[in-house]
C-alpha cells in the first residue's frame, strides 16, 4: 500500500525526553483523544473526529476533504481488531499501531495547546528494524567490567539495521574514556573517532542558555525582562508577548508554540531539511499576531521557536551572530576547535554521513532564524571538554555562566534549569539534554556530586535515550 498523505497542522520538533510525571500526564490527555477517535472510527463518524481538531487544523483542511480522506483511506479498512501504543515522542506525538482486517496501520496524533487534535497521520505500519547478526566493529577494548557493560548496552543500539556510527564518552572521577562503534558512512569501514563530527541538535539549547547566562552576568540582559524590550515595535505590540519573560523562553514556560504556523511556508520547504529557510522576517510576522498556548510561567511545554527566539534576542543584545557568540564565549576559552554551525571545508571532511529512521542517507539540517534551538555540530573531543567544564566549578566568567544555567527555574511538571533538564536514573539526578534531527541523535548528562558525565553521539535518527540511561545505570 502506498504511503498515505497526512492531514495536520505541521509540528516538527527536535527530540526531547521529558520527565516521567510530565510525560504520563500528557500521554493521558493524548490517549483520551485517541480513544475518542477509535470510537468514532467504529461508527464511521468523520464529523465527530473533525470536531476533535484544533482551529488551526480545521483551517488547514475543510470538513469535506477530511471526510473524503477518512472514508477512502481509513473507514474502508474495516473494523479495528487490535490496537496498541507504539511510541510517544517528544512528550508530544503518540503513534498507535492499529490492526484492521488486513495489514496493520500506524496512526500518529498530537495535541495542540487546548488538548485539541493538531496532528493526524495514517500510514502503513513498519516493523521494527532488524538486528545485524555480525557484531559491528568497535574500539572498545572489553578489558574492564565497565567496558563490557557499556558494550552490552551499546550493542542494543548499534546492531540495529538503521544505525551506523556511535560515539560514547564517559567522565568518571576525572578520568575520560571513549568507545566508538560502526562506521561514519555505511560501507566505508571507517570507525568513528574522537574527531568525527556529528549534529548536536537540541543540545545546542544548552549553549544558548550559557550565552544567556553570560550576558546576564555582564548586566546586558535580565531573566525577568519582558521579551518585547528586545523585539521590533511591530512585534512588541502583541499584548500576549508582553507577558513573556526572557527566562520563560529558556525554560519552555513561555506558552509560545513549539513551532510557528507559517513554518512550512518558507521557500523551498522540505521535511528532510525543515529549518533551512525559516527567516527572522517570517518569525516576526508570526509573533506579531500569535496567541500563546498557556499562561506564561505556569506550565512547561517544549518550544523550539521559544529558544530560537531567545537566540535572536541575544544576537540583538550582542550585535553578533549566534555562531560568533558560541565561538567567542564558549569554544575559544575551552579550546573546542570543532564546534560550530557552519563547517569549513577541512572540518566538513570529518562530518559523518547521516541516516534516517529507515537507514537511508539523509541531509544535515541547516538553520537560519532558529539556529539557537539546534544548529551546532561537534565532536566527542569537544563535547567532553564542554561536559567537564560544566562539571568543574572555577572562578572564570564562563564557569559562573555554567553555574547559573544549572539552577532549577521551574519544578512543576518537569524540573528545568536554564536550558538544561533534570532526569532521575535509578535515584540519581542528572543535569541533562538530548537531541535529534532527521539523521542524528545525541545525549549529554552529568552529576557533579558523583563526578559522572556521559556523552553519546550517533549519525542515525534513532533515539539514544535508552542507550544513555542504560549506560548511566552501569557507571553510577
Image (cartoon, grey):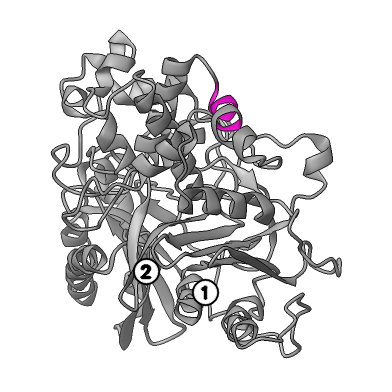
**95 horizontally vs 28: left or right:** right
Which residue is nearer to you in this view: 160 or 262? 160
Q: Quadrant of the image for the C terminus? A: bottom left
Q: In the rendering, at what x and y percent does residue 108 appear?
A: 37, 65
Q: Residues within 10 Å of mark 2 (few under 14, many from 20)?
A: many
Q: Where 269 sits versus 18, above or below?
A: above
User: Magenta region's main secondary structure?
Assistant: helix
Q: In the rendering, at what x and y percent does residue 330 appear?
A: 56, 35
Residue at the location (30% across, 25% down)?
A: 287
Residue 163 occupies quadrant: bottom right
Q: In the rendering, at what x and y percent does residue 301 appear?
A: 26, 49
Q: Secondary structure at mark 2?
A: strand
Q: Earlier in the sequence, mark 2 or mark 1?
A: 2
Looking at the rendered image, the disc whose residue lies closer to the viewer, 2 or 1, is 1
Residue 310 occupies quadrant: top left
Residue at the location (45% across, 73% down)?
A: 469
Which residue is nearer to you in this view: 442 or 358? 442
**109 horizontally vs 266: left or right:** left
Q: Quadrant of the image for the N terminus? A: bottom right
Q: Which residue is mark 1?
A: 467
Q: Identify the mark at residue 107; answer none if there is no mark.
A: 2
Q: Identify the mark at residue 157; answer none if there is no mark.
A: none
Residue 181 occupies quadrant: bottom right
Residue at the location (36% across, 27% down)?
A: 217
Please identify the residue farthest to the top as the structure is shown.
233
Q: Is residue 303 magenta?
A: no
**157 horizontally vs 74: left or right:** right
- Separation of marks 2 and 1 at Cα, in angstroms: 26 Å
Please identify the residue farthest to the front as the structure is shown.
395
Q: Where 231 sits versus 420, above or below?
A: above
Q: Which residues are magenta?
A: 321-327
Q: Pointers 2 and 1 in contact (CB under 8 A)?
A: no
Amino acid at each position: 500500500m502506498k504511503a498515505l498523505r497526512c492531514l495536520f497542522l505541521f509540528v516538527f520538533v527536535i527530540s526531547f525526553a521529558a520527565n516521567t510525571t510530565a510525560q504520563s500526564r500528557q500521554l493521558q490527555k493524548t490517549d483520551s483523544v485517541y480513544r475518542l477517535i477509535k470510537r468514532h472510527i467504529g461508527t464511521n463518524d468523520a464529523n465527530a473526529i473533525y470536531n476533535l481538531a484544533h482551529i488551526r487544523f480545521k483551517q488547514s483542511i475543510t470538513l469535506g476533504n477530511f471526510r473524503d480522506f477518512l472514508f477512502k483511506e481509513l473507514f474502508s479498512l474495516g473494523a479495528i481488531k487490535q490496537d496498541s501504543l507504539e511510541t510517544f515522542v517528544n512528550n508530544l506525538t503518540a503513534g498507535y499501531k492499529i490492526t484492521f482486517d488486513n495489514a496493520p496501520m500506524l496512526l500518529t496524533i498530537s495535541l495542540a495547546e487546548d488538548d485539541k487534535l493538531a496532528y493526524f497521520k495514517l500510514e502503513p505500519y513498519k516493523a521494527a528494524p532488524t538486528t545485524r547478526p555480525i557484531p559491528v566493529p568497535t574500539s572498545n577494548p572489553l578489558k574492564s567490567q565497565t567496558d563490557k557493560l557499556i558494550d552490552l548496552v551499546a550493542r542494543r543500539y548499534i546492531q540495529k539495521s538503521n544505525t551506523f556510527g556511535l560515539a560514547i564518552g564517559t567522565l568518571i572521577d576525572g578520568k575520560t574514556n571513549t568507545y566508538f562503534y560502526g562506521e561514519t558512512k555505511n560501507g566505508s569501514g571507517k570507525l568513528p573517532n574522537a574527531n568525527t563530527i556529528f549534529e548536536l541538535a537540541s543540545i545546542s539549547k544548552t549553549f544558548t542558555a550559557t550565552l544567556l547566562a553570560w550576558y546576564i552576568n555582564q548586566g546586558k540582559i535580565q531573566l525577568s525582562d519582558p521579551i518585547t524590550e528586545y523585539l521590533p515595535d511591530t512585534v512588541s505590540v502583541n499584548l500576549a508577548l508582553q507577558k513573556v519573560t526572557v527566562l520563560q523562553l529558556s525554560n519552555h514556560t513561555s506558552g509560545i508554540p513549539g513551532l510557528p504556523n507559517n513554518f512550512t511556508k518558507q521557500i523551498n520547504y522540505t521535511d528532510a531539511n525543515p529549518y533551512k529557510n525559516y527567516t527572522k522576517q517570517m518569525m516576526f510576522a508570526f509573533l506579531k499576531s500569535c496567541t500563546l498556548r498557556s499562561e506564561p510561567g505556569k506550565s512547561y511545554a517544549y518550544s523550539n521557536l521559544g529558544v530560537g527566539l531567545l537566540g535572536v534576542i541575544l544576537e540583538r543584545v550582542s550585535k553578533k551572530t549566534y555562531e560568533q557568540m558560541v565561538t567567542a564565549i564558549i569554544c575559544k576559552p575551552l579550546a573546542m576547535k570543532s564546534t560550530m554551525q557552519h563547517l569549513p571545508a577541512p572540518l566538513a571532511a570529518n562530518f559523518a554521513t547521516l541516516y534516517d529512521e529507515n537507514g537511508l542517507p539523509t541531509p544535515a539540517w541547516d538553520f537560519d532564524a532558529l539556529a539557537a534551538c539546534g544548529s551546532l555540530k561537534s565532536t566527542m573531543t569537544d563535547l567532553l571538554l564542554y561536559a567537564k567544564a560544566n562539571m568543574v566549578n572555577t572562578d572564570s566568567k564562563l564557569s559562573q555562566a555554567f553555574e547559573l544555567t544549572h539552577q532549577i527555574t521551574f519544578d512543576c511538571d518537569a524540573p528545568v534549569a536554564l536550558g538544561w533538564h533534570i532526569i532521575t536514573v535509578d535515584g540519581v539526578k542528572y543535569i541533562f539534554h538530548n537531541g535529534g534531527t532527521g539523521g542524528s541523535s545525541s545525549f549529554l548528562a552529568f552529576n557533579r556530586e558523583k563526578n559522572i558525565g556521559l556523552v553519546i553521539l550517533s549519525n542515525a535518527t534513532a533515539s539514544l535515550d535508552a542507550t544513555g540511561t542504560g549506560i548511566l545505570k552501569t557507571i553510577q
